[in-house]
Amino acid sequence: MIHKYELITCKIFFTALVFFIFTFHTNCIAVSSGFELKTKYTVIIYDNENILKKFNKEINLGSLSYLLRNKHSFTLEDEVKNKIDVIVERVESILEMFPRALLFSIVLMASDGDVQIMFKNKYGKRVDYIAFYCPKDKTIYLSVRDVSLGVLAHEIAHVIIDHYYDISTPSKIHEILAQYVETHLKD
Ligand SMILES: [Zn+2]
């Protein structure tokens, strides 16, 4: 599940971005572990274009597609950027929380196994999660094989709640609010 342990304090930093940054594309920067796609609120990190394609395919806005009506998408990268930013704004408006200077990362991983290895490295615990948010890294780690709009919105809710309050929010409250967002996304 994606739910229980997202909020435990992180033990190590995700270091993939530290070395060998080269400009690759207007919006994409090749790094040691792959690429970076910058959006208004996020930096999306992924190993190869197939992972980004899979992510884009799984994030289906459905009845929320109207949110993209004024956005122009010429490339895969444009489409992902536009989707992410409208989802962030949608989650903010459901929560009625609009934190200033919101900036976080999303690491796209090929499978839930990769997510679980990352979690084990950080927290020393075996889990069956398909996604989690690490507050210390300000990063969502998710499996593109398992992601959906609801899963992504749930994790983004954790990010927004984390950024909104100056003090750390009790994990039960975090979870209740994140689940509320997931349930009411398309209201
Ligand atoms: Zn959760």
Image (spheres, rainbow, N blue to C red):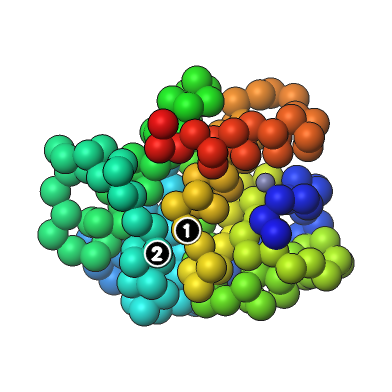
**Dot 2: what SS?**
helix
Give coordinates of residue 39: x percent, y percent.
Answer: 35, 48
Q: Are marks 1 and 2 in contact (CB under 8 Å)?
A: yes
| Horizontal arrangement in the rendering, residue 37 relative to residue 95 (left or right) | left
Packing grade of label 1 (10 A; few <14, some 14-19, many >=20) is some
Give coordinates of residue 43: x percent, y percent.
Answer: 44, 53
Look at mark 2 in the image and give the residue it sits on: 58
What is the distance, in whole Å, between disc 1 and disc 2 at their CAs? Answer: 6 Å
* Residue 35 in view here: no
Q: Is residue 181 above or below residue 23?
A: above
Q: Residue at x 50, y 45 (%)?
A: 153
* Residue 79 in view here: yes
Q: Residue at x 57, y 76 (%)?
A: 111
Looking at mark 2, is its residue's CB closer than 8 Å to ligand 1? Answer: no
Q: Of the residues shown, which amino acid type is indicated by label 1? A: Ser
Q: Quadrant of the image for the C terminus?
A: top left
Q: Quadrant of the image for the N terminus?
A: bottom right
Packing grade of label 2 (10 A; few <14, some 14-19, many >=20) is some
Q: Residue at x 56, y 63 (%)?
A: 142
Look at mark 1 in the image and give the residue it sits on: 148
| Horizontal arrangement in the rendering, residue 33 relative to residue 116 (left or right) | left
